[in-house]
Image (cartoon, helix red, strand yellow):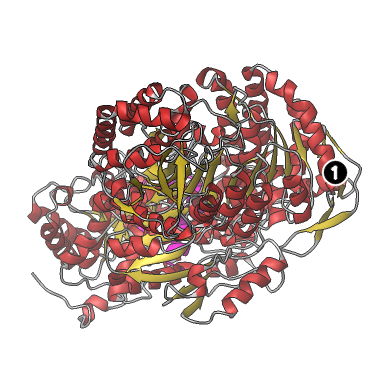
Amino acid sequence: MTIKEIFDSMAYGPAPESATEALAWVAGHNGTFGHWIDGAFTAPGATFTTSNPATGKPLAQVTQGTADDVAQAVAAARRAQPKWARLPAHKRAQYLYALARLTQKHSRLLAVVETLDNGKPIRESRDIDIPLVARHFSYHAGLAQLLPSEHPDLQPLGVCGAVIPWNFPLLMLAWKVAPALAAGNTIVLKPAEYTPLTALLFAEISREAGLPKGVLNIVTGDGSTGAALVDSPVDKIAFTGSTSVGKRIRAATAGTGKALTLELGGKSPYIVFDDADLDSAIEGLVDAIWFNQGQVCCAGSRLLVQEGVAPRFYEKLKRRMDGLRIGDPLDKAIDIGAIVDPIQLATITQLVKDNPEGDHYQAATSVPATGCFYPPTLITGLGTASTLMQEEIFGPVLVAMTFRTPEEAVALANNTRYGLAATLWTENINLALDVAPKLKAGVVWVNATNLFDAAAGFGGVRESGFGREGGWEGLMAYLKPSSKPALLRPVTAPAAPEDPVVDTLDRTAKMYIGGKQARPDSGYSQAICSPKGKLLGHTGIGNRKDIRNAVEAAHAAKGWAKTTAYNRAQVLYFIAENLSARAAEFATRLQDLTGKPGSSEVDASIQRLFTYAAWADKYDGSAKSVPIRGIALAMNEPCGVIGALCPDEAPLLGLISLMAPAIAMGNTVVLVPGAAPLAATDFYQVLDTSDLPPGVVNIVTGPPEDLAKSLAGHMDVDAVWSFSSHPLSALIEREAAGNLKRTWVNHGRARNWMGAEGEGRTFLSQATEIKTVWVPYGE
Amino acid sequence: MQTISPTAPSPTQTGLLPQVTHARNPGMALDLDWVASVQANTSAIERRAATLPGRRSVKKEHQAAWLLKAISLIDLTTLSGDDTEGRVQRLCSKARQPVAPWMLEKLGMPGLTTGAVCVYHDMVETAVRALEGTSIPVAAVSTGFPAGLSPYRLRIAEIGESVRAGAREIDIVISRRHVLTQNWQAIYDEMRDMREACGEAHVKAILATGELGTLRNVARASLICMMGGADFIKTSTGKEGVNATLPVSLTMIRAVRDYEARTGFKVGYKPAGGIAKAKDALVYLALMKDELGHPWLQPDLFRFGASSLLGDIERQLEHHLTGHYSAANRHAMG
């Protein structure tokens, strides 16, 4: 074309970023890579090919990690860990700072390798991914520096295993490696099969930071390598990826005592109210669903538009879609690059083809004839039941429907198994700040989308996983208390003698469901005796139906979460007051049940209620220092319905130690009392007189295994805790995989309920989800 | 006040001027509901503007062609108290020959000129004479430029004077105080009167966005000026503290797009002040291309109000031709 012709057409023309240096780096390794273990590349084993999805051309041969490879890497990490943990915090901070700086110094090489391997536009790897990687290491250098003074009672977990996805290969590495190392752990990381190269490059760069050998290990391979890592003797698994694999990992790690964080899929709502700046909301959609080809776990993939503006919004959106440029990811003027792999492309293509309902609009933009490309697609007119409205597509396909009122928008937004992120657009601050807390999501963006920062927690609720990455809250997932808990001896209820002593009027202890006393569905009861053989009473033998009823009652009481914290504090104080009034009676009961004096446990119970009455309005969220003009609010929200298997060894105090933090934070609970349930059933009379709304606390007595299984498997329970002396931890964690509810179990370890470890921030953090609400501002 | 229905424009209002290839915007009745519904989310607009330069890149001969296009869109401007006939004549000769002939020859673009020359009223006749034999129009800033606070009668009369002196384009300034007090009717009436006073001459409405306080005000003022019959909306006089910026531009051209979608009429856009580098010009062109499309890359719908931009473009073009970075003294000053 002549200049005159271009002058007339004003076409963009090619603007390629050079791949020369990146390819030279691969060539420098003869195009074949081993693992990075103990500070060096291993000799390549059996390899597989990683390709450039934009061209289909092979980039490199990468070793398929075996279980032995994983074992070697874990062993190297294990060897290195004690010394790494003993380093002065400042020294670890220096290493992390060096990794941040080296990321910056090698930024273009990292960006180009990322784009070659993944297919994402160079603009994104250059302007978003790599700068966020540097930011993450830099931020965590700071956390490492401050950790000992801020949290002197915590220690690293040990060796962490990380399995990461292909959509943000190096950024996800940073999200795992930075907190793990900052906290004093060592790590074995398996990058995704499609995109292993930047992890290997980063490992090589870590040499320039002088990182001690074995602190960072990379084992490449496919899902079987990841499974081997999950099964290996690591102390924590951090996984980002699909919900289905997340569930398998939850089940596989159940009962092992391995810490677990899961950042999984989503079908995140993108809500546009009729008073929004529509053009900006559309530009937001470009960043939501056409960022990284829509291969983003938190992509705003479910568009909800207020009905009155929907036609105009769709028209504007289609016009914007037509302007998106799709093609060579190395071109600096490309908006949409290549889908990561032909298999993914086939999955997207098939999913859309199999679901022709609704109006399908593909952007009128030219799509390269070869390579893994899929055009920006909008599907309108779908209903909530449509497959494409429910299932994560993980591609550049936006599905849309309309809503009428804010209330309906919230209902539709939350009508999903997932809960990762949500976006809302409105110029009305009242509406924005009303809706944001109502959305089931770990992250909410107001008038923006896909904002990320190391200081702000990121993570999901529901089947989008649990745990947060970023901020202090993210670091906590890589630490544990310095104290070494003792083994918990099983406590069994005294067996009823054949000829029990009966010397009081028969009293019927029922269950407590929805504020009412309820007989057990089974119609069976269990005699409860003192250690000396006195018949103290009966409790119902609860079953799954009692659990069902209790969970329903707990949901019916969800208004509790909306009451003020002051109100919740008053109720807790009132419970303490009423318990105090009956202290002598409870002390006697405890003495009967346990054979030991009960007054100190009653006193401690009253104190504990005071503790959480105090905390109710003091467990504050925070405003994160994120690098935008705006605020990122980390808000502590209740988990929802928490099922708790209460301790056996402290019949009253144990139950109150779980109940009080949960309800203080606005949760409703289903409590399964421990070995001496009459203390719990007596206690509901205290609850009954303390202005506690019906259903906030429900008590189901019965065999802990059965009830734990029902609770952990219940799809409408948000978290299950267990401090039972029965071996329930594995069962609960395995059953919880069904809806990926959070679990907090004792793994057979004891906790001193009378002491400091029986209360405090740990309980509060387990009782809450941190929601990060981003609100950019400026007029 | 004359009311004009967009569906039945009179011949004079839609008559094609020599440089115009589309129907001229006749304006429409003031629609305050529309104005009230306009939203502009500042931080979102700033984010879009901030990422734009990273999203688009034009290289090699494409870059050269785009820079030549930018030259064809420049309103080469002098608006100083010390302007003289000699100064204006020199500017006009630069407008006729913005790039050294040997360079234009090599680039295959002989005869390229700037889009217009922009001067104060007293310099219009000088400029018109200096540009005789070319199709380069003379634009006059008017209506008590830059503050727009002289007697209303005189501001309107000034337009007529400049048109009679040969100006084919009139850059008017709106009364910022009416925007700041939300007196939309007053802005609309003023625009209407000024448009009428311009007659066949094209009218560019200068919003002085640096004095409007918010992007929402910018969006609303843009819309009202288009309703009032502006042929172009323009950011700045060049005399405000803040002149053309990408966020302001994005806000204004989104208004242009909405106006076209509603009425079918295309309105031009002119960022002015502060655009001094070739790279900036490329970003603006990409913005226009992506947000509004190809028609807004032509001089009838897009202009740069700039005085020093041309010099930087000349150096970049020479670099393109020779492979060596250039120097200012190698190019004729304007």
Residue type pointed to by label 1 = Asp
Q: Quadrant of residue A80?
A: top right
Residue indicated by mark 1 = A69
Residue at (68% x, 25% y) in the render = A95
Is the residue marked by circle 1 packed among few (<14), some (14-19), or many (20+) residues within 10 Å? Answer: many
Residue at (57% x, 67% y) in the render = A393
Residue at (66% x, 26% y) in the render = A184
Answer whether residue A626 is visible to the viewer in this image.
no
Q: Which chain is disc 1 placed on?
A: A
Residue at (9% x, 53% y) in the render = B152
Tell me the magenta residue range.
B267-295
Q: How far from the left and from the top, in percent, is residue B62?
A: 61, 60
Q: How far from the left and from the top, in percent, is residue A664?
A: 34, 37
User: How many tags in the picture?
Assistant: 1
Q: How far from the left and from the top, in percent, is residue A753?
A: 48, 27
Q: Quadrant of residue A381?
A: bottom left
Where the N terminus of chain B falls, by quadrant? bottom left
Q: In the figure, is residue A529 to the left or right of A108?
A: left
Q: Nearer the viewer, residue B83 or A447?
A: A447
Q: Is the residue A101 above or below the residue A376 in the image?
A: above
